[in-house]
Amino acid sequence: MSELNVNILKAWHFIESLHTPIVPKKKGTWSKEIFTDNTSRNKLRRLYENEQTWQPAELHESKKEISYRYYRHIFKEFRLIELIKTKLGDEEKLINRGIEELFSLTFSVDQKGQYIADSLFVPFSLFFITKINQADVVYDSLANEFKEALNNFEEGLKELLLDGVTNETMNKIDVLFARYFFVMPQLEKCNYLEYVIIRKNQQQPIDYFNSFYLDDLEQAMTKVNQEPLQSYLTGNSSNNRIDIDENRSFIEEITRPALIPNGRWPSPVAHKLSLMQQVAVNTVLDKKLPISSVNGPPGTGKTTLLKDIFADLYVQRAEAMISFSHPLNMFTKVGETRGLGPNKRSMYSLHQNVAAFNMVVASSNNGAVENISLELPMLTQIGGWKKDEDKLHEFEKRYIEEVKQINMFTATAESLLDSKKAWGVFAAKLGRSKNIDDFANAIGDKQNPSSLKALLDSENASVEDWNDAVKEFNVVRNQIHVHKTKLEQFNETHHNNADLSMSIEQLEKDQQGLVEEKKTVVEELRTFERKLLELNEQIKQAPAQTWWKRALKLKNKALDDLLIKKQIFVQQVTDSGKELHSLEGKEAHLQILLNVQRQKFKSYESELAKLSREKVAFPNDAFWEETPSAYDTRQKESPWISDELNYLRGLLFIKAVKVHKIAILLSKGPIFSAIDTIRNRKNLNVNIPENRAFLANMWDILHLVTPVISSTFASIQRMYKGIEGKPIDYLFIDEAGQASPQQAVGAVMRAGRVIAVGDPVQIEPVVTMDEVQIEDIRAHFEIDERYVGSKASVQTLADEANPYGMYKKAADLWIGMPLWVHRRCLDPMFSIANKMAYENKMVLTNSEAGVTSWINCVGKAKNAQFVEEQANYVAQKIVEAFTEAGAPVCKEDKFPNIYVISPFTAVKFETIKIVKARLKELFKDSEENMKKSIEFWIAKSVGTVHTFQGKEADIVYFITGTDENTDGAANWSCSSVNILNVAVTRAKKEFHLVGDYERFENKEFYRVIAEHAEVVESKRESLTSEDNLLKV
């Protein structure tokens, strides 16, 4: 198994080594004051064909120096992909052509034009292409062959640049390059020159042109037997899987009152999690698996679920913290360093019980991780905050009052949120160096009054404050415990209810049996007593014995017989009396037992009625009825949780905030040490083991202040540079279905536990490699398509590792824990997506009707899939929406909430041009700021499907593009459900498909839209650009 895992990592490493970087997008200019010729310069500028290559500049400041980085042999991304497809004999046309500019080589020279050592970079892909058609290519030796070619080229490059840069020298470099590497045909008619200015004796900035994942993939090869990486690579045996969907026994067990998490996010108490949300939360927190996964269709509350997990882990850490009599006892001094400023700084470690809750949210999607880390600290996230607090429930009002009173360094949080209202520094977007610097300055710049350091200097706390915070926390925790204990007792009573009913029934039968038996005994006793009376009468009436018989002591046989009978009857009366007494005792005892059991049943019914009044979902037989309406109802419910219990759980989170706040105020030394470390982290030499430990401790302590941090996968390696072990306790992977499996390896390798959240039937990972090449790689490394293939993602591997999930019937596909309650789209968008992608398992919460239409708009495709008539139709609708909003003088917050989506990049770019032209005309007399706002609106509102993953709008226009001559591209757009599923589920209220109805209506997945959409014929006379521009 270890060998297979290493092969998987080797395959991923090889794929990542083929990464070809784009020309950096370095905007801005160097000010003219910097240069002796008083001329400003773009930091990155184009050098056109035949333009002078050597363009030196002199600096005024002698303490600084300038270097020049050249990017040569520029070509468009799609040309490389098309070239590889051609070489592999794949004649299938490329649907979406990437137009990013890539470079073939880059290097830097100094002020004299001489080569700067180690500045050369050539993409491995341009070496691999020279070998791609070799039948005997050996993958394992390619890296060494490439290094040899690169070294030889670098030696020649260095020699050619001894006399500086000239056009002739560059031509010679190009010839030398062609000796070792592939020269792309159809190069762009330009190169690029970047001006780099640094202080003298400062190290040249490191430009990381290789894939960000290569180093971590190499390191992971030595850790394949460590969890959770091992589970990520090997998955979980199908024999260990438990299908939890509609699994009554599992769901009742995992949602029983004892397993309700103590903490929850303080959202409105009536906003309970849905059934499967609560199942997922409880499973993640209770089962403690190396890897958990949640499959959530759009709008099913994946972020909501994560917030509840964050909240409970935060409460768990507070529970660990309050075991210390003073917060300073949580810290241990571990050394000193001078690397953080002019004076020595003491360094601290955090107790392992407290430092076990570091939470990191990671994704390949920068927008996804930023959204969650920017959302969590906002005041609007507490109690459903509203400006009009009179509309809030008393529970929510108290939440808001409490967090405002605690003031968890809100000024610092608001500085990180661009002055938006915040409640505390609960989360921050980190990852890339600039984000970390911004965060470090926000918390550590003492000159800034809103910085954490300044706030800590201005506020103090006492041990009494700590004791009060602990006491408040414990009071609420105990109240929750009482609630949960009562519910758990009732739950046990419920599970024993059948036995209780049977017990009462049996006792009643036993009682009835005793009554009958007692009746029989009473009748027998009366019979014996009557016969005894009769016998006594007979004895009285018996003739007296004569004197001589008495003298001779002769027996009176008749009397003796009567006396014997009397003795028998007396004994029978005595025995019957005793039996009657015994039966009466048994009856009394039985009545006591029956009263006890009846009281239990009465209490059960009373508690059941109370739960019903409190609208608490109770998982009884009615809850589990196998009817569509019962299914819908139970999916929306969260068993056992009342409003009051929800309130207390949210309140406990806020009390945990107070515990953290007082602990921070009483531990300023360790906190300041961590702040200084992150601000000066670049000065620490990570080759020294002690410094590596300091950095690890820094993150532990900073997580006390900011429990949740976010990063893209690409930044994980650099963010934790030099840190050994597992600095991440809980890794939450968002939009896991979008990420290629290898992207998460570095984060998984550094994590204690992994929770992946996503949806494999939304946007898939971008795969630019040709399928023939992919198959060749799989064969060479002896791995299957789970690891390298168009469907392989972080989500699919996390699902494979998760023993709790379900099988999708249509594909016999195992997925992680499913969510089914949808809260975004109105119908019929909901029904379309539910049928297309989710086997009609989703449940809708909103019965309001939405709109779906099919605008039958036909035209000739040009520039690949672009149909001008369709773009013009949509542009006209956008103009109408802006006009209705008050254009050309409408305010920015009144801009229409519209997305325009297409599967094709060509349609995107051409539609943007038309929409820009139409809105430019509409806003021609507006101020410049308004025009910039319109530009920004277009950029975020018109795009391909990938642009809008995780987003939503009131109205969506989906442009199909294509005509009969490009129908292959149309078929590609529905080759899987993903594209249309994402497009439809972006629309909250209206979805309008713009395309050729006759050609598309019977295509896979489009036919589902056709079943629900009203067909509208477009008016062709209004669909030319000239006419439309005249109408505005």
Image (cartoon, helix red, strand yellow):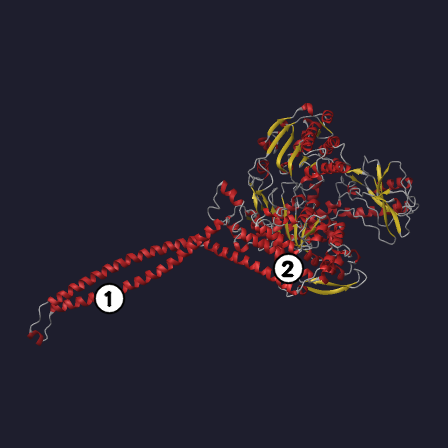
Vertical side of 772 occupied by 866: above or below = above
Q: Is residue 661 left or right of residue 249?
A: right
Q: Is residue 200 left or right of residue 632?
A: right
Disc 2 marks which residue?
Answer: 659
- Asked if residue 162 can be seen in this view, the reply is yes
Q: Residue furthest top?
A: 1021
Vertical side of 252 occupied by 297: above or below = above
**Quarter where residue 591 is shown:** bottom left
Name which residue lies at 76% across and 50% down.
Answer: 434
On the image, the x and y values in percent for residue 527 come to 20, 60
Circle 1 sits in a helix, a strand or a loop, which is it? helix
If you read the primary sequence from the N terminus, does the residue marked by circle 1 or circle 2 appear first? 1
On the image, the x and y values in percent for residue 651 come to 59, 55
Circle 2 sits in a helix, a strand or a loop, which is it? helix
Vertical side of 514 occupied by 192: above or below = above
- Mark 2 burial class by Cα count in 10 Å: few <14, some 14-19, many 20+: many
Picture quarter with the C terminus: top right
Counting the numbered discs, the total is 2
Disc 1 marks which residue?
Answer: 574
On the image, the x and y values in percent for residue 122 come to 81, 44
Mark 2: which amino acid? Val
Q: Considering depth in this image, is 480 or 526 the residue closer to the camera?
A: 480
Name which residue lies at 35% across and 55% down.
Answer: 508
Q: Residue furthest bottom?
A: 551
Mark 1: which amino acid? Thr
State the CA–CA distance, disc 1 to disc 2.
76 Å
Q: Which mark is residue 582?
A: none
Name which residue lies at 66% across and 58% down.
Answer: 661
Q: Considering depth in this image, is 180 or 21 the residue closer to the camera?
A: 21
- Mark 1 burial class by Cα count in 10 Å: few <14, some 14-19, many 20+: some
Q: Is residue 750 left or right of residue 564?
A: right
